[in-house]
Image (cartoon, rainbow, N blue to C red):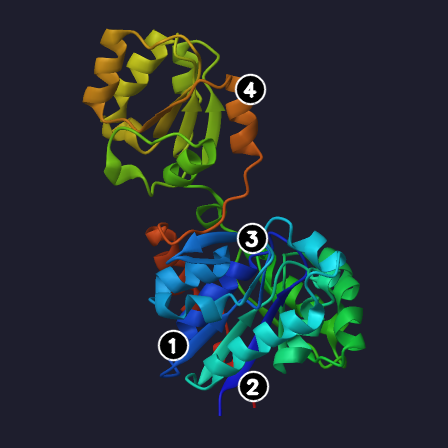
Amino acid sequence: MCKKLFIAATGQHCGKTTVSLSLMHLARKRYGRVGYIKPLGPKCQEFGGVMADKDAVLMAQVYGLGGQIALMSPLVLGRGSTKRFLDGELCREWAEERITNACRELESCCDLLLVEGAGHGGVGSVIGLNNADVARLVNAPVVMVAGGGIGSVIDSVRLNLPLYEKEGVNVRMLLVNKLLADKRESSLAYLSKYFDGSGIQVSGAFDYSPVLADPTLQSASKLLAHPLQGDPRQKQRIIHHIQLGAASSQKVIDGLMESTLIITTSSRDELLVTLSSLYNIPAYHHRIAGVVIPGHAPVSAITQRIIDDSGIPYIRIEQTTAEVYSALNGHISKISAEDTEKIALVTRLAEQVIDFDAIEGLLD
């Protein structure tokens, strides 16, 4: 008989997908056949000729499950779907049937099925299928992922719990993510004290890490919708800092920190040449992640040649410096299947910090 686990979250950006990716890795070390389903997909893309949720696509790519993608993402709320439900063109019963049939088919060929929810508990309410409804529908115990802290975690869990209680769904574990390393044990102890007697176990996931939170050069390229040029081997390099190259060249260089992406206009020949020249010097290579070059004015021919010869990763874009800086600073980095270094790190850390024995105990 297939065991099931529903992975919920208190809200966006608390690391639910990273946790799901990790649990998939840990489960595959214990079970011969592990499946995954994202019953309700609010963010979709085409994969293998199928419109599927982005998280389901990620799992399919990382774990070689492409042949099951239609089952892994049975219900996608694409553009216009909300209005079609509200206008009566689509109904809850139809949506329930799609989810139930896909879940049943995956159960028939799996020993363990991970069911990932969508956003906070209320997502899906517009079609009558919020996360609590779906957890009840697939009959799976719930692990709820929350961001780090104490008071904020308690508040966010309390905000979500009534939906699950209304549906008679057991939230059996709170998995706290993005913990501050020096406060990890203290935070988990206080949260355990608060939830003592509630039937909800408290366990820790990942500590907050810039390596996991920060974007790669490739993700910055995708965000800006312009190609990453220069050394292609650097596309997975992680950007830890973003700096405007508005000051003098010397001040910009003096201000470089670990793995900095510099934004400087196409007219700053001196700075572009200096950065290119320093890029291959070991003392500076670890500080210079790459350059974004905004501006309508062309880069001079000699400067462009120096840039190309150096191999420094760069993105050439005609937007303004302010637009580029705003886009990059407002971006929340999400793991993609191409982030192989991050995924390797996540799965390795998961074996150290996630108590899979405790999670497995919820399935009995």
Q: Is residue 228 left or right of residue 263?
A: left
> Circle 2: is it few (<14), some (14-19), or many (20+) Cα within 10 Å?
some
The quarter of the displayed image where residue 285 is located: top left
Which quadrant is the C terminus positioned in? bottom right
Amino acid type at circle 3 is: Lys
Q: Which residue is mark 2?
A: 363
Q: Which mark is residue 63?
A: none
Q: Earlier in the sequence, mark 2 or mark 1?
A: 1
Amino acid type at circle 1 is: Arg
> Circle 3: is it few (<14), some (14-19), or many (20+) Cα within 10 Å?
some
Q: Which residue is mark 3?
A: 43
Q: Which mark is residue 322?
A: 4
Q: CA distance from mark 3 to mark 4?
A: 28 Å
Label 4's element? helix
Q: Nearer the viewer, mark 2 or mark 3?
A: 3
Label 3's element? loop
> Circle 1: is it few (<14), some (14-19), or many (20+) Cα within 10 Å?
some
Whole-percent x, y for residue 322 in the image: 55, 19
Q: Earlier in the sequence, mark 1 or mark 3?
A: 1
Q: CA distance from mark 1 to mark 4?
A: 45 Å
Q: Earlier in the sequence, mark 2 or mark 3?
A: 3
Q: Is residue 154 visible?
A: yes
Q: Is residue 278 left or right of residue 143?
A: left
